[in-house]
Image: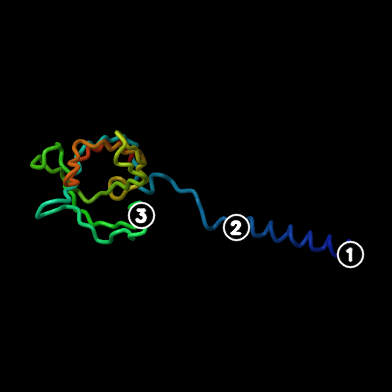
Amino acid sequence: MASQITIFFLILSLSTILVIGEDHGFARSLDRKLLGFKKEKLSHFRFYWHDIVSGKSPSSVPVVKPPLNTTTAFGFVSMIDNPLTMGPKVGSKFGKYNGSTITVLGRNPVFNTIREMPVIGGSGLFRFSRGYAQAKTHTLDIKTGDAIVEYNVYVLHY
């Protein structure tokens, strides 16, 4: 009797798995042309990021300071409106912004010579983009904390 009940529940379980396993409504294949994908291309962007934390008009302002009981900057939050320029001088030409974005994520250990971070996506012209960004400190004023960082960003996009 016990073996018949075991066999019954085994058959019931397998049939339930088979019925549930057939539904693929949550995912489907799409034609790339429906999303407007064209030929994939590689773009290289080089710009300079000016992080000004000193003076009358800083471009980076602390909003939340880290707790006093920490030896790291964990918990530190700042608001930034740092200019991106085509050259390292503050008065150099600004690049044109067209409404598209590139999303860079990752750790940026600022005292390393070259830092590499992944490009994980974007919007507008850079939808479905991928690639990497390399950051290199061009100048750093230890007294004021002001920095100019050169970025080389390589992006595959459609």
Q: Amino acid at mark 2?
A: Asp
Q: Nearer the viewer, residue 87 or 1?
A: 87
Left or right of 153, for residue 25: right
Instruction: Name the residue tied to disc 1.
Output: 2
Sequence order check: which comes first, mark 1 or mark 3? 1
Left or right of 54, for residue 8: right
Q: CA distance from mark 1 to mark 3?
A: 60 Å
Q: Secondary structure at mark 3?
A: loop
Across and down, in percent, residue 59 comes to 16, 52
**At x 28% / y 35%, what residue is drawn?**
43
Q: Secondary structure at mark 2?
A: loop
Q: Nearer the viewer, residue 59 or 56?
A: 56
User: Around disc 3, counting alpha carbons within 10 Å, would you say few (fewer than 14), some (14 to 19), or many (20 or more)?
Assistant: few
Q: Which mark is residue 158?
A: none
Q: Name the residue furthest right.
A: 1
Instruction: Name the residue tied to disc 2.
Output: 23
Sequence order check: which comes first, mark 1 or mark 2? 1
**At x 9% / y 55%, what residue is drawn?**
56
Which numbered disc, 1 or 3, marks the residue closer to the eye?
3
Q: Nearer the viewer, residue 21 or 123?
A: 123
The colour scheme used to paint the residues is rainbow
Q: Nearer the viewer, residue 69 or 24?
A: 69
Q: Amino acid at mark 3?
A: Phe
Across and down, in percent, residue 100 comes to 25, 49
Q: Which mark is residue 74?
A: 3
Sequence order check: which comes first, mark 3 or mark 2? 2
Image quarter in which the C terminus is found: top left
User: Around disc 2, counting alpha carbons within 10 Å, would you say few (fewer than 14), some (14 to 19), or many (20 or more)?
Assistant: few
